[in-house]
Amino acid sequence: MLVLSAEQMADIATAAEAAWPAEGCGLLIGKGRRVITVTRVMNADNLLKAQGNDRFELDPKVRFAAERSVRGTKERVVGHWHSHPDGSARPSATDLAQAWEPELIWLIVGIAPDRQGRPQAVQMLAHRLDRDAGRVFAVRMETAEKRACQAARFPT
Ligand SMILES: [Zn+2]
């Protein structure tokens, strides 16, 4: 399961809308194994934004900075997000072909224009991609706020 705060989700949606009609992208920093909680989102430049709106390559400088920032902490790079300008939040064939790191979570935001032509985040889904098996696995998402409510303890 992937846990994000409502604010982190809004940040990702805003960055993805700003990148439209190209794909936007960023890194997810977090902790935990079975339940992965995102602690920080680092938005990055898509180096391929000038080469069509169906691909992304996250600026490696941001990845290096992220790896440096988590060294010696409980945090790690747990995954990344990118957007699809056609509104779909499912991995494309291009995504699957580029899934070199099977442990990473792929968060995908579908962006579609509203009636005024303004880009809107319409869907957000998380996945794991098994490139060798050619398969995609859905990862359940939950907001940190909802989990905090469920964990509440009442005095007896
Ligand atoms: Zn994609």
Image (spheres, helix red, strand yellow):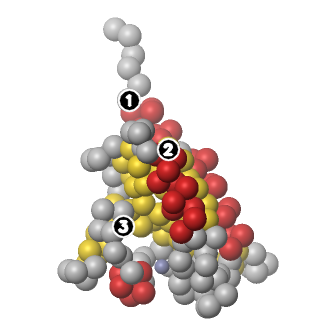
Label 2, label 1: how far apart the Cα atoms are: 18 Å
- Residue 93 screen position, x and y as percent: 38, 87
Q: Which quadrant of the figure has residue 127?
A: bottom left
Q: Which mark is residue 39?
A: 2
Give amino acid for label 3.
Answer: His
- Residue 135 screen position, x and y as percent: 26, 78
Label 3, label 2: how far apart the Cα atoms are: 18 Å
Would residue 21 be seen by someone viewing this image from the given angle? yes
- Going from the N terminus, do you reach mark 3 or mark 1 first? 3
Q: Nearer the viewer, residue 106 or 154?
A: 106
Q: Which mark is residue 127?
A: 3
- Residue 100 screen position, x and y as percent: 34, 75
Q: Identify residue for label 1.
A: 151
- Residue 9 screen position, x and y as percent: 57, 54
Helix, strand or loop under label 1: loop
Position of residue 43 in the picture relative to residue 116 (left or right): left
Q: Nearer the viewer, residue 67 or 32?
A: 67
Marks 2 and 1: CB-CB under 8 Å? Answer: no
